[in-house]
C-alpha cells in the first residue's frame, strides 16, 4: 500500500538519519526490512522507536559469517540498501558496496554519514551540530548576538541527511530500472545542509563576500523574528512582502506611525522598532495575539509544542498527528491524491519478523535451526 509498493529496502539499522530515512520510505509503501543487532533484549524498545514503524524487524549478528551471507541473500531481491556506519565498517563486515553489487548489480547502496565517504574528517566522530556548523547552515540560522543554535537533529540529521538519502535512493532506483545499473549514494549531512542554503543565498545581494559583517538570515529585521508574550509564550511574525507587512502594522494599530510604515526601508531604525514591538507583544498573551492575527495576511503563527500542536484546528483538519499505542507521532508526508500512504500501526518488537523473513528465503527448517543454534539470530531465551 502506497506509492512505493513493490520497492524493497534492506536497512542495516543504526541511529538517527538512517532509520528515519527507512521510516519515510516505509510510510510511502516500501517494504523495509530492518536488520537489527541482537545487543538488546528481543522485544525491548529501541532508542529511536518511532523510526521503526512500518518495517519488518530481523535480528542478525553481523559479526558472524552466516549472518552476513543471510544479508547478502536478502540483498539479491532488494532494490536498495541503507547503512549509516562510519566509512569502512561495512567493508570490514563483508557487506561493502563491491560485494553487495556483485550479488545484485541493480542495487542502490545508500550510505548515510555526517562527513561523507571521502575528505579529511571522515573518521572523526561528530553529531548534527558539528556538520551544520562547518557547512555554513548553523551560522545562517542564527540571530545577531545569539549563540549559534538550531533545532536538534532537524537541520543536519533529518533535512540535510535522511531526506537527501531518500531522494538519492529513489533517484537511483529509477535509474536502475531504466538501465539495470546499481550505484552508491553518498549522502552526507554536511553536503545536504549546505545544499539547503541555496534558496537563501540566492536572495542575498552580497553573495561572494560580505557574510562576515552580519547574519544575512536575520539581519536585524524586526518583522522576521519571534517575540515573547505576556504569558511567557512565543509567537513568530514573518511578513516579508510589503503588503503583508502593511497588514501586520495595521492590525497592531501602528498604521499612523510613519517610522513603522516605512520601517522595512529604514535599517537604522530596525533595532529601535524591534525593541518597541517586543514591548508591545508583551502586553497580551499568546492566545490573545493568536485571536487577533492568526489566519490573516500578517504572516503570524504561535510557537507550539508538539503536544499543543495536536489541538490546533489546522493540524486537526489535516490529521497531522496521531497517537498509536499511547505514543504521539506525525502522520506520513507528503499526501497523494490517488495512492494513500501506509496506515500507521504498532511499532514491531525487535526481531518480530526474523523467522518469517528468513523463511521467505526458502532456507528450510534445518538451516533456520542451525542459524539459531550458532547464535546468528541472537539469543531466543
Image (cartoon, rainbow, N blue to C red):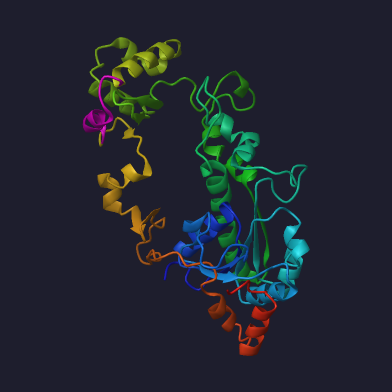
Q: Determine the residue positioned at 29% across, 17% down.
A: 280
| x then y, percent, for residue 202 | 54, 33
168 displayed left or right of 23: right
| x then y, percent, for residue 327 | 38, 56
Figure quadrant of residue 93: bottom right
| Main secondary structure found in the magenta portion | helix
Depth order, front residue of 75/15: 15
Is 207 contained in the magenta span?
A: no
Is 285 contained in the magenta span?
A: yes
| x then y, percent, for residue 105 | 70, 72
Q: Which quarter of the rendered picture does the N terminus lie within?
A: bottom left
Q: Determine the residue positioned at 30% across, 30% down.
A: 298
Of all residues shown, which one is farthest toward the front?
A: 381
Q: Which residues are magenta?
A: 282-294
Question: In this rendering, does residue 360 appear at all?
Answer: no
Q: Which quarter of the rendered picture does the C terminus lie within?
A: bottom right
**Number of numbered discs visible in the structure rendering:** 0
Figure quadrant of residue 251: top left
| x then y, percent, for residue 94 | 76, 67
297 displayed left or right of 76: left
236 displayed left or right of 10: left
Q: Is residue 266 above or below residue 156?
A: above
Question: In this rendering, does residue 125 appear at all?
Answer: yes
Figure quadrant of residue 366: bottom right
Q: Is residue 102 above or below residue 337?
A: below
Q: Is residue 53 above or below residue 195?
A: below
Amino acid at each position: 500500500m502506497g506509492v512505493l509498493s513493490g520497492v524493497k529496502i534492506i536497512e542495516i539499522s543504526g541511529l538517527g538519519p538512517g532509520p528515519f530515512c527507512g521510516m519515510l520510505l516505509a510510510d510511502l509503501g516500501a517494504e523495509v526490512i530492518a536488520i537489527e543487532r541482537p545487543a538488546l533484549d528481543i522485544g525491548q524498545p529501541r532508542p529511536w522507536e518511532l523510526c521503526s514503524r512500518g518495517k519488518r524487524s530481523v535480528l542478525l549478528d553481523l559479526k558472524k559469517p552466516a549472518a552476513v551471507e543471510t544479508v547478502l541473500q536478502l540483498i539479491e531481491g532488494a532494490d536498495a540498501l541503507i547503512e549509516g556506519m562510519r566509512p569502512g565498517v561495512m567493508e570490514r563486515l563483508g557487506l561493502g558496496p563491491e560485494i553487495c553489487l556483485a550479488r545484485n548489480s541493480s542495487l542502490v547502496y545508500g550510505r548515510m554519514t555526517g562527513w561523507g565517504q571521502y575528505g579529511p574528517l571522515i573518521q572523526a566522530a561528530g553529531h548534527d551540530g558539528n556538520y551544520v556548523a562547518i557547512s555554513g547552515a548553523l551560522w545562517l540560522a542564527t540571530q545577531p548576538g545569539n549563540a549559534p543554535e538550531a533545532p536538534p537533529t532537524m537541520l543536519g540529521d533529518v533535512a540535510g541527511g535522511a531526506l537527501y538519502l531518500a531522494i538519492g535512493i529513489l533517484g537511483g532506483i529509477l535509474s536502475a530500472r531504466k538501465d539495470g545499473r546499481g550505484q552508491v549514494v553518498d549522502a552526507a549531512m554536511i553536503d545536504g545542509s549546505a545544499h539547503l542554503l541555496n534558496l537563501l543565498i540566492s536572495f542575498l545581494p552580497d553573495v561572494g563576500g560580505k557574510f562576515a559583517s552580519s547574519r544575512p538570515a536575520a539581519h536585524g529585521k524586526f518583522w522576521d523574528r519571534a517575540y515573547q508574550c505576556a504569558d511567557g509564550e512565543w509567537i513568530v511574525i514573518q511578513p516579508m512582502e510589503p503588503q503583508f507587512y502593511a497588514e501586520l502594522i495595521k492590525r497592531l494599530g501602528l498604521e499612523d506611525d510613519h517610522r513603522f510604515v516605512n520601517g522595512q526601508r529604514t535599517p537604522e531604525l530596525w533595532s529601535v522598532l524591534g525593541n518597541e514591538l517586543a514591548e508591545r507583544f508583551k502586553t497580551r498573551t499568546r492566545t490573545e495575539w493568536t485571536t487577533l492575527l492568526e489566519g490573516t495576511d500578517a504572516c503570524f503563527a504561535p510557537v507550539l509544542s508538539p503536544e499543543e500542536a495536536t489541538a490546533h484546528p489546522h493540524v486537526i483538519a489535516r490529521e497531522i498527528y496521531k497517537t498509536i499505542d499511547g505514543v504521539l507521532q506525525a502522520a506520513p508526508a507528503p499526501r497523494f491524491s490517488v495512492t494513500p500512504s501506509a496506515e500507521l500501526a504498532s511499532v514491531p518488537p525487535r526481531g518480530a519478523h526474523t523467522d518469517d523473513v528468513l523463511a521467505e528465503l526458502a532456507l528450510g527448517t534445518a538451516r533456520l535451526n542451525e542459524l539459531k543454534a550458532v547464535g546468528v539470530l541472537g539469543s531466543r531465551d
